[in-house]
Amino acid sequence: MRILLTLAWRNLWRNKRRTLITVSSVLFAYVLATALLSFAKGFQQQMTETLIRQETGYLQIQDALYFDEPSLDHTLAYEEEVKEALAALDDEISYVVPRISGFSLAAKEMSTRPAMVTGILPEQENKIRNLSGNMVSGEMFGADDDYAVIASGLADMLELGIGDTLILIGQGYQALTATGMFKVGGIIEFQLPEQNNTAVFLPLKKAQWYFAADNRLTNLIIMPADTDRIDYLAGALRNRLDDEWYTAKTWRELMPDMVGLMEMQDTVYTGITWIFYVIVGFGIFGTILTMLYERMQEFGILLSIGMKRFQLGLIAFIETILICLLGIAGGILAALPIVYFFQIFPVEFTGEMADYILRFGMEPVFPFLIDKQIFFNQAYTVFGITLLIGLYTMRKIYAVNILEAAQN
Amino acid sequence: MQTVIKTEGLSKTYTNTAVPVHALKDVNLEFKEGEFTAIVGPSGSGKTTFLNVIGGLDKPTKGKVVIDDIDIATMKESKLFDFRMRHIGFVFQAYNLIPVLTAVENVSFIMLLQKRPKKEMEQRAKEMLEQVGLSDKLNTRPAQLSGGQQQRVAVARALASRPDFVLADEPTANLDTESAFNLLDIMARLNKEENITLIFSTHDQRVIDRARRVITLVDGAVDKDEHFERN
């Protein structure tokens, strides 16, 4: 075996320039694919985390019917059963964020606008999305206050300012009429126009009173201690809660469209990386074929003097694999600092693009994601392609006609 | 003397040509241990085909090639690889050394395939290179050797594993006079010292003049089989 390895290694360097060019093509494809996917995954992670924090949290406990029919009639009772389930899984949970929300009509004198009224515990809510940090005037209420914080777009449309009275009219729990008048104590700004033109926040207790839904929540957001254990936590909660009344759903279940979009993005990026690899694959294939045909006479001689086809095939196979391994090793060494650099100094969008991204509540700054799986997957892919080429070379050698090759 | 190779009714016809070519016709020959034989004849007389067939590189259309009481004409390809490695040494016209191995590695190569002990292998390779006058070129690669030197390494490679016989296809064809004589001296000496059967195909009168047996092939058939006394 040692002689086969020696021969393969020395054969590689018979034409140094060609070998280096082939190794470089593997290296560049590896670096490009890894950098592209690290950027894409970094972007995706940032987008997902933003949405998770703004919308659903990682996990929610809801009324069993709320997901299919999201109305106040399907709010959950925040009672002992839920609290006991949470207490039993205390080690797995970082904190919980209770919310009650529903659509209402917001009015001032003769002006009305649709509004999304959300009852929150500001201290808990700040942990997940730092609402207080987005205040543009006034201040965020405390849990026991009784004033409202409204989004700046809605405030402008209704010409509401700090100290003015906001009138809310809507439908409460079990078809009761929800009406309320709240002083505007703060104005908050969101980048997403839809959110900025509709959001009204009330202290949780006030919102429950307004919706006539004492001690009820539309959703109880659970922030897990370890985001990798969401599925376990969801399962454990489901086991502890009566499934006639409650359900626990992960962000993937809560945002199926988002998951579909991510899968589509993954498919697109995988497709792009495969284009790199197909090009590189043909490059390696061409080089290996040239190497094979150049050495046909040598193969004939080696087979004549008693070398077995398997041994000769193995040499050519090892040569192919060595090219791949050198390319991958070089690729990893080159890609790591690049990805690491862009994680520390992320890609920063400016101008209109930055404004556009900000509208979605995301910072226009995208750090690359360092994920060993990306590095491994690219290595497996290149290795797989090379393995196929290597097997083809072995097959070629098995088909060599000794006499014809030796007399080439 | 023991018979090393025996051919019986050996015929080879190539049918993949416009007209069938009868390269060998009913060749019956015996080669004894230690013989130094030249196979001569004009181009197309079947010299190379004969060497290919008795070397197990090509199959006869008819007849037998008996080596060590085995008819190699009926042997499967997978067994032939092993048989060639253990029983036959080859010297080619174009030297055909492995370019990425040094002289000593080239000479050891077949012994390595035979899985001989490392120490024995190294000692034998050095000894053979010494015999062919290249003890100062042990670690030199073929590209750094002259044609004559490369062919001497090829001879050392062919003989190192102590095969039953060595087949040499026009080994002096690419060599200048001095190198050719030098090589022939070495081969004649090794033939005597190692008692290895040498069979050459050649046009080269210098080789023919050294051979103790000269077989002339004409149109694939044995025309003459002459024995000479030489020193």
Image (cartoon, grey):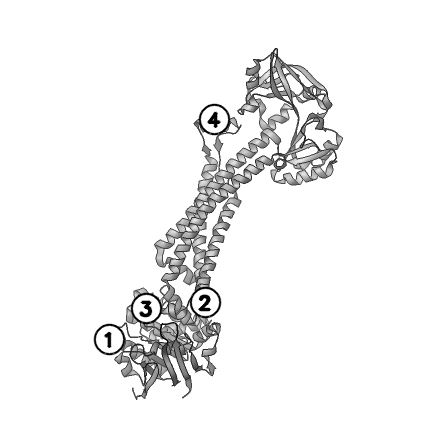
Distance (Cα) linking label 3 and label 2? 30 Å
Q: In the picture provided, is B228 more to the left or to the right than A227?
A: left
The amino acid marked with disc number 2 is Arg
- Tell us which disc is closer to us: 1 or 4: 4
The amino acid marked with disc number 1 is Thr
The amino acid marked with disc number 4 is Asp
- In the rendered image, which quarter is residue A69 located in? top right
* First of labels 1, 3 by sequence position: 3
Instruction: Categorize mark 1 by other alpha carbons within 10 Å: few (<14), some (14-19), many (20+).
Output: few
On what subunit does the disc labeled 1 rest? B
Return the residue at label 4. A355
Return the residue at label 3. B137
Q: Are marks 1 and 3 on the same chain?
A: yes
The amino acid marked with disc number 3 is Lys
On what subunit does the disc labeled 4 rest? A
- In the rendered image, which quarter is residue B42 located in? bottom left
Numbered tag placed on residue A309 in the rendering: 2
Q: x%, y% of residue A309?
A: 45, 67
Q: Secondary structure at mark 4?
A: helix
**A47 or B145, which lies in front?**
A47
**A403 or B21, which lies in front?**
B21
Distance (Cα) linking label 1 and label 4? 86 Å
Query: Which quadrant of the figure contains the C terminus of chain A?
Result: bottom left
Specify the farthest residue to the front. B18
Instruction: Categorize mark 4 by other alpha carbons within 10 Å: few (<14), some (14-19), many (20+).
Output: some
